[in-house]
Amino acid sequence: MNLLKRETLSRRTLLRGLGTVMSVPWLEAMGPVTAWSAEAKAGTVAPCRMAFLYVPNGVNMADWTPAEDGVLRSLPPTLEPLAALREEILVLSGLTADGARPHGDGGGDHARALSSFLTGAHPHKTDGLQIRNGISVDQVAAAQVGNRTRLGSLEIGGEAGAMAGNCDSGYSCVYSSTMAWRSATQPLPKEVNPKLVFERLFGSGQSAEKGRREAMRRSILDYVREDAQDLTRRLGAGDARKLDEYFTAVREIELRIEQAAKLPPVTVPEYAVPAGIPASYEEHLRILCDLMVLAFQTDVTRVSTFVLANEGSNRPYPFAGASEGHHDLSHHGGDAAKQAKLRQINLFHMKQFAYLLGKLASVREGDGTLLDHSMIAYGSAIADGNAHNHEDLPVLLAGRGCGTILPGRHLRYGKETPIANLWVSMLRRMEVTAEKLGDSTGTLPGLEKA
């Protein structure tokens, strides 16, 4: 038996030599892998990560829902790409996004679906500037744990979307293209260009260029502040308040820049810098998956959102056997041919999710994997695209949450159980203080080990 006392290393241990500073991967000497805890905050155990992936227009539920509750002994057709990862997922049935329902506002299910998915709120119907929603679960987490990483959160997506205009029955385009909300009036746009995502995560790799860019950013912030002081004198109370909210956001960016300067440098991984947005949609999504994995692996961030396509998207999928638009096919009206093509689109999306989970599972970290130390939610706030219903949603949760989740099961919850209860449960596993989120009524039982 080895009686030598092992030295405990900090998670932020760096290698130094000849002017080079290099991060190191997770080592056993950094301590045991356990759930997120006070020890994790000190850097002695693996941190827990969380990510949220969204698919639009609902799914073909008959091909999604497992036949039996309890242990996942087999998978329905749409989930078959996850066969090799069956013991790493939870299928959660019965969850509801009540905020996506009309509540007297008429049409606009698609806009309400995406904007309410992570907020549990009912967005204010407007196609103008008076947008109002709720804070999303990712930003609740980022506000409390984001100061431990270079980026508080990462927002990415496979389809660009407008931040203004009328996109769905009188709802602003921001609602149907944005999942992350820092506050009720501050949506966080997603980045769809892999090259820009890479630069945001790791920089351009050229220190002189990076220095010029940061200096320019500071000078722009100063200029905006000075210019706004003159402008404020000519504004009414309402506009002055909005400008104050804007400057609060600017100040938060400044503080993040200052915080980032105090953290150890991040080693740029051995990964070819993306040239831009690939012509292939599948390649586009997979590069974004790779970048999310790298962001978690290098601890650049622990929180991410990924919108595979905007809600209501009518993108065709000819490479998957569906040349018609996705939204058009989702209104299948019971037509078997349309449902078959919709099934192929659902399968395509699920293959990308399987790819992401496979990459996370391939990264060793301590006595587990990156997937073991993550919680990856996947789903939609529309169940059947033809019915536009928002109950019994298609929702998956992958990963073990640093040992606090027992996957490999199908759990069915009671009617009208808020999906926000799942988000609160995930926040608790990040040790984020959040008694309530949107319409949540508590936490989801049964996720943990028996």
Image: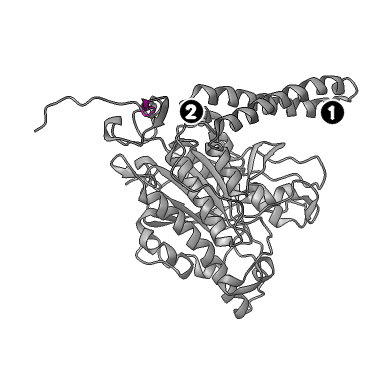
Q: Establish if 349 lies above or below 165.
A: below
Q: Establish if 203 lies above or below 364.
A: above
Front-lying residue, 373 or 434: 373
Please identify the quadrant where the N terminus is shown.
Answer: top left
- Neighbor class of circle 2 (other Cα within 10 Å; few <14, some 14-19, many 20+) is some
Picture residue at 68% right of the left edge, 40% below the top: 187
- Residue denoted by label 1: 238
Q: In the structure shown, which secondary structural element does the residue marked by tag 1 occupy?
A: helix
Specify the quadrant of the image occupied by residue 44.
top left
- Neighbor class of circle 1 (other Cα within 10 Å; few <14, some 14-19, many 20+) is few
Provide residue 337's location: percent of width, then percent of height.
Answer: 61, 80
Specify the quadrant of the image occupied by residue 185.
top right
Q: Is residue 175 left or right of residue 366?
A: right
Q: Is residue 13 magenta?
A: yes
Q: What label sits on residue 148 in the rendered view? A: 2
Provide residue 255's location: percent of width, then percent of height.
Answer: 61, 23
Distance between mark 2 and mark 1 Cα atoms? 35 Å
First reached walking from the N terminus: tag 2 or tag 1: 2
Picture residue at 56% right of the left edge, 45% below the top: 305
Residue span colored magenta: 11-17
Q: What amino acid type is highlighted by mark number 1?
A: Gly
Front-lying residue, 222 or 92: 222
Front-lying residue, 437 or 27: 27
* In this view, the mark in front (2 or 1): 2
Q: What amino acid type is highlighted by mark number 2?
A: Arg
